[in-house]
Image (cartoon, helix red, strand yellow):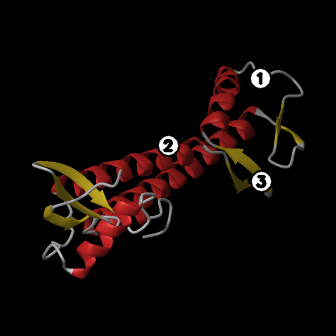
Amino acid sequence: MAIVVTDVRGAVYTRLGNISCEIKIGEQWFPFTASENDPENHGRQLFTDLISGRYGEIKPYEEPPEALTQSRERKKVEINAWRNAMEAANYTFEHNGRKWDYGKQTQARLEPSVAAAKAGILPEGFFWTDAENNDVPMTAEALMALSEAAEKAMFTKGMEIHVQQRNMKKALEALNSADEILAYKVGQES
């Protein structure tokens, strides 16, 4: 049985280019979204009739204010997740002619050894493994210097991450549509 639409009102474009409206069938009005790709013939025909002007003007899409807010909040969550992942990552730095790992995991591994070094109970023959997997003999002083250099590298990287995160959030605030916000690539330099 074919659907017979006797009237249409309130036609407005959707964000995706379809047309949202109300259709009258018999004496009742029903919400409907017409699409040129509708799987049903009556949906495609209604879209064609609307585009042709048969039912009057189609109002342009207007982004609801909450779409902007929701998109921005979603993207801020992505930025925060990026920041957390970057802060938890492992990096390398140069110290005394070698490459060394640094990051939260390295810092956690270093802490008990540095405490032992400060207490004067570092075992004889103690070594620390560099980023290239070489065991490097360490005195208490050398280990504490390595720990301080790792903390400095970690602080510097943390500030870089923080500044980039703040710049991404500023760039996000400058965007004026949900489409622009959702298209924004988290992690890009701003």
Could you say which disc has been placed on residue 99 in the image?
3
Could you say which disc has been placed on residue 84 in the image?
2
Please name the amino acid that badge 1 sits on: Leu
Q: Residue at x 31, y 54 (%)?
A: 71
Q: In the structure shown, which secondary structural element does the residue marked by tag 3 occupy? A: strand
Q: In the structure shown, which secondary structural element does the residue marked by tag 2 occupy? A: helix
Label 1 crowd bin: few (<14), some (14–19), many (20+), radius 10 Å:
some
Q: Is residue 107 left or right of residue 62?
A: right
Q: Position of residue 168 (x, y in %)?
A: 39, 62
Q: Residue at x 21, y 59 (%)?
A: 5
Q: How many marks?
A: 3
Q: In the structure shown, which secondary structural element does the residue marked by tag 1 occupy? A: loop
Q: Residue at x 41, y 62 (%)?
A: 41
Please name the amino acid that badge 3 sits on: Lys
Please name the amino acid that badge 2 sits on: Asn
Q: Residue at x 30, y 64 (%)?
A: 15
Which circle's residue, 2 or 3, is located before the other in the chain? 2
Residue corresponding to mark 1:
122
Question: Is residue 17 visible from the viewing direction of this image?
Answer: no
